[in-house]
Amino acid sequence: MCTVWAARYLTPNGWRRVEDPRDVRDALRAMLEHDGPALPDVVTDPNALAVPPHLTGRQLAGFATTTSKLVLNGGVGRMIGFARSNLRNIPRP
């Protein structure tokens, strides 16, 4: 899951930008219903993880290795920001 911050799409009248995340779904639907070419431009959180539906042990090991190297090389603050970005994207019951 990824939080979309903003989106815009090209129409014959120019770009239409949507900045309220609650309006993105309707904007993308309108873009897809448009009769002609469409070009979406979606702004998302650059730190959000793209998680496949099924993780393998190798993928988890690679992630753990990468984050460990980041922290050990002085990137603790960056890792905290990374964690915050992803924790806010976890669905709440």
Image: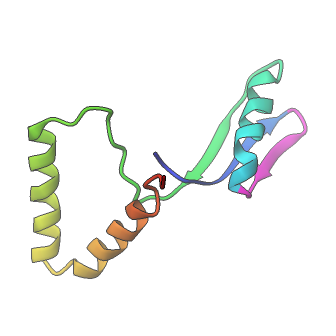
Image: 16 above or below 66: above
Residue 20 percent across, percent down from the top left: 74, 57
Image: 12 above or below 46: above
Q: What range is drawn magenta here?
A: 12-20
Image: 50 above or below 48: above
Q: Is residue 50 left or right of residue 75?
A: right
Residue 10 percent across, percent down from the top left: 77, 38
Residue in view at x 29 percent, y 81 percent: 77
Marker count (numbered): 0
Nearer the observer, 49 or 10 = 49
Q: Is residue 33 left or right of residue 52?
A: right
Image: 71 above or below 50: below
In reply to whether residue 17 is colored magenta, the answer given is: yes
Residue 92 percent across, percent down from the top left: 48, 55
Name the residue furthest top: 35
Color scheme of the displayed model: rainbow
In reply to whether residue 64 is colored magenta, the answer given is: no
Residue 93 percent across, percent down from the top left: 48, 52
Residue in view at x 59 percent, y 53 percent: 43
Residue in view at x 30 percent, y 75 percent: 80
Name the residue furthest right: 13
Q: Is residue 60 left or right of residue 5?
A: left
Nearer the observer, 83 or 17 = 83
Residue in view at x 77 percent, y 40 percent: 27
